[in-house]
Each structure stands twice: as C-alpha cells, then as structure tokens.
Amino acid sequence: MAGQASRRRNAPKAEVKIRIRKGDTVQVIAGRDKGKTGRVLEVDRTKGRLLVEGVMMMKKAIRPNPQRGIKGGIAERESSIHASNVMLLTAEGKPTRIGIKTETVGGKTRRVRVARKTGETLDKK
C-alpha cells in the first residue's frame, strides 16, 4: 500500500482545462476582491491559477541592492487567483461562461471560444 501512495505522489500533475487566456479581461466573482476587473497577465495551467492585473495585491518586503539599483522597502505586487473565481467579460462588459464552437474558414476547421450569454466569438483572428 505504501508503494502505491508514493507512486501517485510522484506522478506528473495533469493540466487543468482553463479556457481563459493571457490578455483576456476578467471579473472576480468570489473572494476578497469580488467585483474587480482586470487583464490576465499569466495563466498557470498546472495549478489552475491566474495572475490578474490589480487583483489580489500582496505586500512584499524588498531588500535593497545598490549594485542593481534596487531601493529597499515594501512593494505591492499581484498574487495568483484560482481560475474558478473569475469570469470572462464580453465586449459589452458582461461576465459570461465560455463555450467552444468549431468554425470552418477556407476549408480549415478551427475551434473558437464563444460567449455563452451573448453567443459572440471571443477569439480575434
């Protein structure tokens, strides 16, 4: 039994299916920053978390480094938020769930993200 537990622990983690991409505008729907909107800066699919501009601000102590020209003090930076706590905003600014639709353009088939609420396509290309 002990051998099975260690094998599972060392197995590579599967990526979480997140339909939100870098550059999307999202709104926080749960947590201490509920209601805030921001642009997605980074997506971590292994942990299922997002880095959103201006959301989940944390204070961090910075040690001064004269060689690099860094002043010491307390700096504020974004912390990650779980993907389930945000919703994508449409062009009108309405929060919506995301669906996938296949589209055929010039004989090529590709998957396109679609807003469930309005039906508009979210991918630009």
Image (cartoon, grey):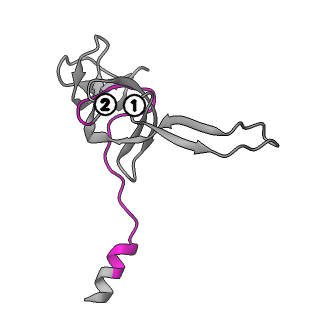
Q: Is residue 89 magenta?
A: no
Please tell me the numbered disc located at residue 105: none
Q: Locate residue 99, reporting x and y percent.
A: 23, 31
Q: CA distance from mark 1 to mark 2?
A: 7 Å
User: Is 85 situated above or below 47?
Assistant: above
Residue toward you, 102 or 60:
60
Element assignment for label 2 = loop
Dot 2 alpha-carbon crowd within 10 angstroms: few under 14, some 14 to 19, many 20 or more: some
Q: Which amino acid type corresponds to the residue marked 2 in the rendered image?
A: Asp
Q: How many marks?
A: 2
Q: Is residue 61 left or right of residue 108?
A: right
- The region drawn magenta spans 6-31
Q: Which residue is mark 2?
A: 33
Residue toward you, 109 or 122:
122
What secondary structure is the magenta-colored segment mainly?
loop
Answer whether labels 1 and 2 touch (C-beta < 8 Å). Answer: yes
User: Is 63 situated above or below 122?
Assistant: below
Q: Residue at x 23, y 35 (%)?
A: 30
Q: Farthest residue toward the right?
A: 67
Q: Which amino acid type corresponds to the residue marked 1 in the rendered image?
A: Val
Q: Residue at x 26, y 29 (%)?
A: 34
Q: Farthest residue toward the front?
A: 73
Q: Locate residue 45, reporting x and y percent.
A: 39, 48
Q: Locate residue 102, reporting x and y percent.
A: 27, 30
Q: Residue at x 82, y 43 (%)?
A: 67
User: Is 90 situated above or below 72?
Assistant: above
Q: Mark 1 or mark 2: name the one nearer the start of the chain.
A: 2
Dot 1 alpha-carbon crowd within 10 angstroms: few under 14, some 14 to 19, many 20 or more: many
Q: Which residue is mark 1?
A: 55
Q: Residue at x 45, y 27 (%)?
A: 23
